[in-house]
Image: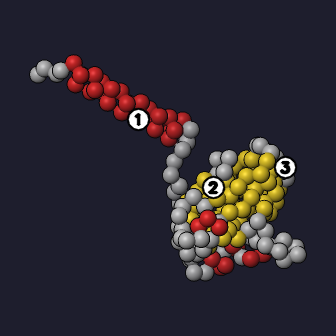
């Protein structure tokens, strides 16, 4: 069987690209430990308040020990519910000290939403009936915008908040 010179070049290029892709995938999966979530916790989307983390008084930022925080959030139609402050005002900003370990726990009661803290590695899909979790260490000072990166309806652009690292 005879291959034309250009066919050989494209076969070598395609095979090489496939090998590089599989090496990158293997590196991410086995060396870096990147895996899809398993044993994800489920929740009744019609009764999320039954779960302790998503009761009204437990929403928002909570320090669990020195330098470790948990943020409980409920995403719903065009809003991230970050809880209320001591005056009863709606919280739109989460303030966390630099270098803190933060566990974000999020669920939704209506449609699929996204949760991204722009400028950090926090990026999750939030699905009804599931609790999405992501733990990270916030190493840089600044204000980072929380955005919904999954189109969820006509008011999608109104879903935002702020994480302030000081």
Q: CA distance from mark 2 to mark 3?
A: 19 Å
Q: Residue at x 74, y 77 (%)?
A: 56
Q: Residue at x 22, y 25 (%)?
A: 7
Quadrant location, the N terminus: top left
Disc 3 vs disc 1: which is toward the camera? 3
Foreground residue, 38 or 8?
8
Question: Dot 2 corresponds to which residue?
Answer: 116
> Is 150 on the left or on the right of 98, as rendered?
left
Disc with the residue nearer the chain's start (2 vs 3): 2
Q: Where is residue 20? Give x, y as percent.
A: 41, 30
Disc 1 on helix, strand or loop?
Answer: helix
Question: Dot 1 corresponds to which residue?
Answer: 22
Disc with the residue nearer the chain's start (1 vs 2): 1
Decide: few, some or many residues near mark 2? Use Cα within 10 Å; few <14, some 14-19, many ≥20: many
Q: Quadrant of residue 156?
A: bottom right
> Is 4 on the left or on the right of 165, as rendered?
left
Q: CA distance from mark 1 to mark 2?
A: 28 Å
Q: Where is residue 23? Give x, y as percent.
A: 44, 32
Q: Where is residue 157? Give x, y as percent.
A: 61, 65
Question: Dot 3 corresponds to which residue?
Answer: 166
Q: Quadrant of residue 145?
A: bottom right
The answer to whether marks 2 and 3 mark residues whose Cβ atoms lie closer than 8 Å is no
């Amino acid at each position: 069987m005879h291959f034309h010179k250009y066919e050989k070049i494209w076969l070598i290029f395609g095979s090489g690209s496939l090998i590089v892709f599989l090496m990158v995938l293997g590196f991410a999966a086995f060396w870096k430990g990147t895996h899809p979530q398993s044993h994800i916790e489920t929740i009744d989307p019609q009764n999320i308040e039954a779960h302790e983390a998503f009761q009204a008084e437990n929403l928002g930022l909570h320090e669990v020990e020195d330098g470790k925080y948990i943020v409980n959030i409920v995403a719903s139609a065009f809003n991230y519910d970050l809880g209320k402050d001591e005056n009863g005002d709606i919280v739109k900003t989460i303030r966390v000290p630099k270098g803190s370990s933060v566990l974000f726990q999020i669920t939704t009661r209506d449609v699929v939403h996204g949760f991204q803290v722009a400028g950090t590695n926090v990026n999750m899909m939030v699905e009804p009936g599931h609790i999405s979790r992501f733990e990270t260490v916030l190493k840089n000072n600044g204000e980072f915008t929380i955005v919904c990166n999954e189109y969820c309806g006509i008011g999608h652009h109104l879903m935002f908040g702020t994480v302030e690292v000081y």
